[in-house]
Image (cartoon, rainbow, N blue to C red):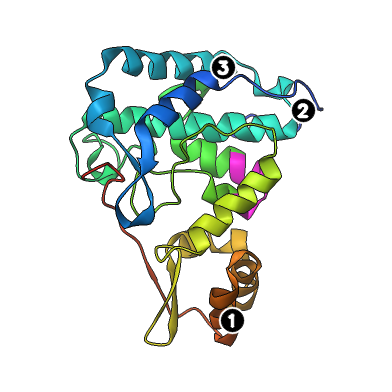
């Protein structure tokens, strides 16, 4: 049995937010709209800039010195999502050039970097898997978190060119949901069947207990024409996912 995780999400309201300006500046510098109508990361330029690599390291180190319990609920959410996304960028940059994050692994771990306990917050060693599945999912119980996390893949919800903050968080999560659902990598109709991102399969219970509930979730964020098509469907027809790197030119 694994050791139970410390509960990070039950703290009373606290400070309004943590200053994510360093990460925000880096994202503005290296993330931009690119191929397939989605945001792409210029890993090559970032990798060649030692000062900006150090800034990313420093930002992640600074986050690890923060007690998330001192933050408000919205600020805690932003804290964890930014830490996840920043660490994902760091592991890809360390391995770059690489065609997919699935190749970022070591001989004693499954494919990908998600199980490496390379972070420590409030004295607890954490992996990316821990942040997503043992902190964010049970602690916030909001399916929109899956539109905020980025796994450095083309099939993933896009990495925003700015850091997440507590300010306007609800509206920005809605916007992230709309961006994913209204793009072909999120929802598409193929041969009359509804094909979804595998995210809706991997985390099915977060979006609904049945196909019908998942379709209702999708309709909420779909543009009118897509919503009409979804409404015609009685079940999910299939899933797809693109694990290629979300890099500029990759």
Q: Are marks 1 and 2 in contact (CB under 8 Å)?
A: no
Name the residue tied to disc 3. Answer: 123
| Gap in angstroms between the C-alphas marked 1 and 2 | 42 Å
Q: Quadrant of residue 216?
A: bottom right
In this rendering, the label closer to the viewer, 1 or 2: 1
- Residue beneath the point at 64% across and 21% down: 18
Name the residue tied to disc 2. Answer: 11
| Gap in angstroms between the C-alphas marked 3 and 2 | 16 Å
Magenta highlight range:
136-144
In this rendering, the label closer to the viewer, 1 or 3: 1
- Residue beneath the point at 57% across and 40% down: 134
> Badge 2: few (under 14), some or many (20 or more) residues near its Cα, within 10 Å?
some
Whichever of labels 1 and 3 marks the residue nearer the N terminus, that label is 3
Q: Are marks 1 and 3 in contact (CB under 8 Å)?
A: no
Name the residue tied to disc 1. Answer: 228
**Circle 3 sits in a helix, a strand or a loop, which is it?**
loop
Q: Is residue 59 something that shows in the picture? A: yes
**Circle 2 sits in a helix, a strand or a loop, which is it?**
loop
- In reply to whether residue 134 is colored magenta, the answer given is no
Q: Quadrant of residue 225?
A: bottom right
56 above or below 199?
Answer: above
């Amino acid at each position: 049995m694994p050791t139970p995780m410390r509960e990070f999400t039950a703290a009373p309201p606290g400070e309004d937010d943590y200053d994510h300006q360093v990460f925000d500046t880096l994202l503005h510098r290296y993330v931009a709209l690119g191929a397939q109508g989605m945001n792409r990361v210029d890993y090559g330029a970032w990798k060649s800039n030692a000062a900006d690599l150090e800034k990313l390291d420093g930002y992640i180190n600074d986050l690890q010195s923060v007690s998330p319990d001192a933050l408000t609920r919205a600020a805690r959410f932003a804290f964890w999502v930014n830490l996840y996304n920043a660490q994902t960028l760091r592991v890809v940059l360390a391995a770059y050039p690489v065609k997919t994050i699935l190749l970022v692994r070591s001989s004693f771990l499954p494919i990908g970097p998600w199980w490496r306990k390379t972070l420590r917050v409030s004295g607890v060693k954490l992996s990316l898997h821990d942040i997503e599945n043992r902190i964010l999912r049970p602690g916030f119980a909001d399916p929109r978190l899956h539109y905020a996390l980025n796994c450095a893949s083309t099939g993933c919800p896009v990495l925003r060119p700015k850091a997440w903050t507590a300010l306007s968080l609800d509206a920005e999560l809605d916007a992230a949901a709309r961006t994913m659902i209204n793009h072909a990598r999120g929802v598409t109709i193929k041969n009359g069947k509804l094909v979804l991102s595998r995210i809706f399969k991997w985390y099915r219970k977060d979006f609904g207990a049945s196909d019908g509930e998942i379709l209702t979730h999708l309709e909420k964020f779909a543009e009118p024409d897509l919503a009409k098509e979804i409404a015609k469907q009685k079940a999910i027809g299939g899933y797809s996912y693109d694990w290629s790197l979300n890099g500029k030119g990759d």
